[in-house]
Image (cartoon, rainbow, N blue to C red):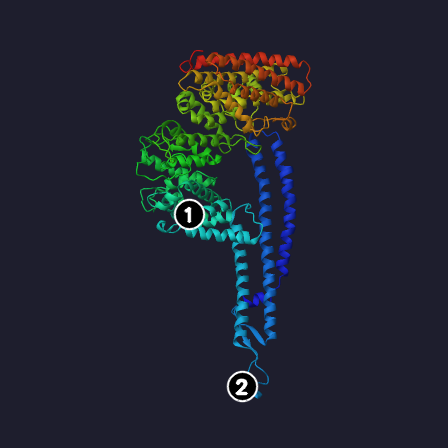
């Protein structure tokens, strides 16, 4: 800070800027509220169809979010400007007071013209008559003290001004388009984040021999505190650089390289891995030029040796383990995945052989529990499970493209789900048995890729309707499992994800059970009318999956053999059935949205298709009880009962089908757990029965399970129809319940006979 600039500072423009930003914040707060209440909520309640369902609704949601980010960024900028102005005003006051005090002691502060200053003592006017020979009333100590005081003031002012510039520049660079969501209550908080990033990056750059336990603890604590901070994360990652990032983790996680850390902080390595991964994920979403270069370079060195002390590790093997936590930038994940699979293809000779097989002396790169981390595909798939958009594109991309040597392309999905020779993996926590993480991470990534939300979460009002890439992938999953049930039944741990996927495609599944031609020939009016009726009966928002009845039955039969997979679909189907009853029995539903003029036909169709799905799942459940899996009836009931807890204790909220179901705005506002709706009544009965059955001492046998399932399915469907008819005060509600009961029984029994036809080699006779 120049002496002259601070001494003669005019703060009028800075005052105006602070005032203007304060006013802007107020306006943006109003716009944010209007965008959320007026745009976002209205969009979520609207009845979207076609392209609008896939594009417009999502665009409106993102646009509304930009208003929130704009308000956040404006608030942070205002806080930084306000704090800096107040500090500079205080330093200006201190400087002018210091100069004034100096003048009282006959000291003069002179601007040297280059931003500096000098302090001199004033010459006495009577110097020639003083017998002592003194020419000034001041001592050298007075001069030095004033000089040092002014220098301290200027240094602090410089620090204040520089830190503000650093923070404001970093904020502006965070997002190339739109606004950053980086929020700081004041300038010091933002500046401290940047400073901490520099210091922690310096620690991580140290030679592994010099990295102490104290350094480890500080790194872990700092990354834990700041891993969601955009400024910190970008600064840390770019200061550390891609090569040092990889070598740091390769060395820190290797007990042969860092024995002190392995001995004293072994149990904290997983936490450090997670915190480092979350930090890099946050950094990857920054648009700064340095971070863009970081991501490009990280992909480029993925197939190159890491410069760790022991060597023999590639960049992909290290970085994939840091992807296990956090939501990384979509484009980075896509580019990374392409290069990773190119390397996989090269190492496996087009998938013909194993790759990434760990030997006993190789280090563990994953310390977050699960596999050893030696196979980079496993860690990457775990990362994809948090990144739906990148996951969808990845699985639909080619592993082997169609070319002169290959008559047919092989997608990443087909290669990983059907063809890959997975390396034998041990668990990083040294537990006995082979790790199942690789394929389990595959299932989770497929869940994200087909549903549009991170694996393990439930759809919300903001989850976009399915797009063509997602439905294509679901079609491929169904076809693959139908072709070979063992791809799922031999790996039951994948079925929780498969069940959740199926629960979010129930409208598409119900359509398939009708056997109505989804592509009627032009001019065939009867076939066209039939398909239009099914589309109205099971309306779909966004793209619809085209499924074959035979294949979907064989798929559900496989999913139903796992308690968690069974529960996800069964609970989802009961919710969906209740929603359909509420939707179609609404007297306010426009006539052109009704599948039939006769409400009896509609109720019967809903009940029958619901019964078919439940019946097919029950076949799978019975097969598991009788088969080598040695599952018990209680396990299935317990899994169903757990959905009440997953739903947060609010019956019907967030369970199963989610966003692919269209309800009119009127109905939509009242469905989803409100007391008295068909959904709430059905799920309350379902959970109550499951909780009671799970506590019984005696487990049902195969035939008993099937029979009990039939009785229960009929009961729930009857209750849902009766509740919907009662909710709308329809006449003859007992008749409505009877129609549902009769058709649910028919659908359930038909599922058994149909499954015997399309999967005789799969079904054990009851």
Crowd rating for badge 1 (residues with CA inside 10 Å; few <14, some 14–19, many 20+): many
Q: Position of residue 411 (x, y in %)?
A: 40, 30
Residue 651 in sight from this viewpoint:
yes
Q: Residue at x 43, y 23 (%)?
A: 479
Measured as percent of width and height from the top left, residue 341 is found at 37, 36
Side of 138 relative to 239 (left or right): right
Q: In the rendering, at what x and y percent does residue 330 appear?
A: 47, 39
What is the CA distance from the residue labelled 1 to the residue labelled 2? 65 Å
Q: Which mark is residue 689?
A: none
Q: Percent x, y for residue 602?
A: 60, 16
Q: In the depicted view, which residue is nearer to us: 176 or 674? A: 674
SS at circle 1: helix
Q: Residue at x 68, y 17 (%)?
A: 730
Give the SS element for disc 2. Answer: loop
Give the labeled residue for mark 2: 133
Disc 1: which residue: 216
Q: Earlier in the sequence, mark 1 or mark 2?
A: 2
Q: Residue 377's image quarter?
A: top left
Whether residue 30 is situated above or below residue 146 in the rendered picture: above
Is there any visible trace of residue 536 in the rendered image?
no
The reply to whether dot 1 and dot 2 touch (C-beta < 8 Å) is no
- Give above or below for 629 relative to 194: above
Q: Is residue 409 left or right of residue 729?
A: left
Q: Is residue 370 left or right of residue 83?
A: left
Against 633, is 469 above or below?
A: below
């Amino acid at each position: 800070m120049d002496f002259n600039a601070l001494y003669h500072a005019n703060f009028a423009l800075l005052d105006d800027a602070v005032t203007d930003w304060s006013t802007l914040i107020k306006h943006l707060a109003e716009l944010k509220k209007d965008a959320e209440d007026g745009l976002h909520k209205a969009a979520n309640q609207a009845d979207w169809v076609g392209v609008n369902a896939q594009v417009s609704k999502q665009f409106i949601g993102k646009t509304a979010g930009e208003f929130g980010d704009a308000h956040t960024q404006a608030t942070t900028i205002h806080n930084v400007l306000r704090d800096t102005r107040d500090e500079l005003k205080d330093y200006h006051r201190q400087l002018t007071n210091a100069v004034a005090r100096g003048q009282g002691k006959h000291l003069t502060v002179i601007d040297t013209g280059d931003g500096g200053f000098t302090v001199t003592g004033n010459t006495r006017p009577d110097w020639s008559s003083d017998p002592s020979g003194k020419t000034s009333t001041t001592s050298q100590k007075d001069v030095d003290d004033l000089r040092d005081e002014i220098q301290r003031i200027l240094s602090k002012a410089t620090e204040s001004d520089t830190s503000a510039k650093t923070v404001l520049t970093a904020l502006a660079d965070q997002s190339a388009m739109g606004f950053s969501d980086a929020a700081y209550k004041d300038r010091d908080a933002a500046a401290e984040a940047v400073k901490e990033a520099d210091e922690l990056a310096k620690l991580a750059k140290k030679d592994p021999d010099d990295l102490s336990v104290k350094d480890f603890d500080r790194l872990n604590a700092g990354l834990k505190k700041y891993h969601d901070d955009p400024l910190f994360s970008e600064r840390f990652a770019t200061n550390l650089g891609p090569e040092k990032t990889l070598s740091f983790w390769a060395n820190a996680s290797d007990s042969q390289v860092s024995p002190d850390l392995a001995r004293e902080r072994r149990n904290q390595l997983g936490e450090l891995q997670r915190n480092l991964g979350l930090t890099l994920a946050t950094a990857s979403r920054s648009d700064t030029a340095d971070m863009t270069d970081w991501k490009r370079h990280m992909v480029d060195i993925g197939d190159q040796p890491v410069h760790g002390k022991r060597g023999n590790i590639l960049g992909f093997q290290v970085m994939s383990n840091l992807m296990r936590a956090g939501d990384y930038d979509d484009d980075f994940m896509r580019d990374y995945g392409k290069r990773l699979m190119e390397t996989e293809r090269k190492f496996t000779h087009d998938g013909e052989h194993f790759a990434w097989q760990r030997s006993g002396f190789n280090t563990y790169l994953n310390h977050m529990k699960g596999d050893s981390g030696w196979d980079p595909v496993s860690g990457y798939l775990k990362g994809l499970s948090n990144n739906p958009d990148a996951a969808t594109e990845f699985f639909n991309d080619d592993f082997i493209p169609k070319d002169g040597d290959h008559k047919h392309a092989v997608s990443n999905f087909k290669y990983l789900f059907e063809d890959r020779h997975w390396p034998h993996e041990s668990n990083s926590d040294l537990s006995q048995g082979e790790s199942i993480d690789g394929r389990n991470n595959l299932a989770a990534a497929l869940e994200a890729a087909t549903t549009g939300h991170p694996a393990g979460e439930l759809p919300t009002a903001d989850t976009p309707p399915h797009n063509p890439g997602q439905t294509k992938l679901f079609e491929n999953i169904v076809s693959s499992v139908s072709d070979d049930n063992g791809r799922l039944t031999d790996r039951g741990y994948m079925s929780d994800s498969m069940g959740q996927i199926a629960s979010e495609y129930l409208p598409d599944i119900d359509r398939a059970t009708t056997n109505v031609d989804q592509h009627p020939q032009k001019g065939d009016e009867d076939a066209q009318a039939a398909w239009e009726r099914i589309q109205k009966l099971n309306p779909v928002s966004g793209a619809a999956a085209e499924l074959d009845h035979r294949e979907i039955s064989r798929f559900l039969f496989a999913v139903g053999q796992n308690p968690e997979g069974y529960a996800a679909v069964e609970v989802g189907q009961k919710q969906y059935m209740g929603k359909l009853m509420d939707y179609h029995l609404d007297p306010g539903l426009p006539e052109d949205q009704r599948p039939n003029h006769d409400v009896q036909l509609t109720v019967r169709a809903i009940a029958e298709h619901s019964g078919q799905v439940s019946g097919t799942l029950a076949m799978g459940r019975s097969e598991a009880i009788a088969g080598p899996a040695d599952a018990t009836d209680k396990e299935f009931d317990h899994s169903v009962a757990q959905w009440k807890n997953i739903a947060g204790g609010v019956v019907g909220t967030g369970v199963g089908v989610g966003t692919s179901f269209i309800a009119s705005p009127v109905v939509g506002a009242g469905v989803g757990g409100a007391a008295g709706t068909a959904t709430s009544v059905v799920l309350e009965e379902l959970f109550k029965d499951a909780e009671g059955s799970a506590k019984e001492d005696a487990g049902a046998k195969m035939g008993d399970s099937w029979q009990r399932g039939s009785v229960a399915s009929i009961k729930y469907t009857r209750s849902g129809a009766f509740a919907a008819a009662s909710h709308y005060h329809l006449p003859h509600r007992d008749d409505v319940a009877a129609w549902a009961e009769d058709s649910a029984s028919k659908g359930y029994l038909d599922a058994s006979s149909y499954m015997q036809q399309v999967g005789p080699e799969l079904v054990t006779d009851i």
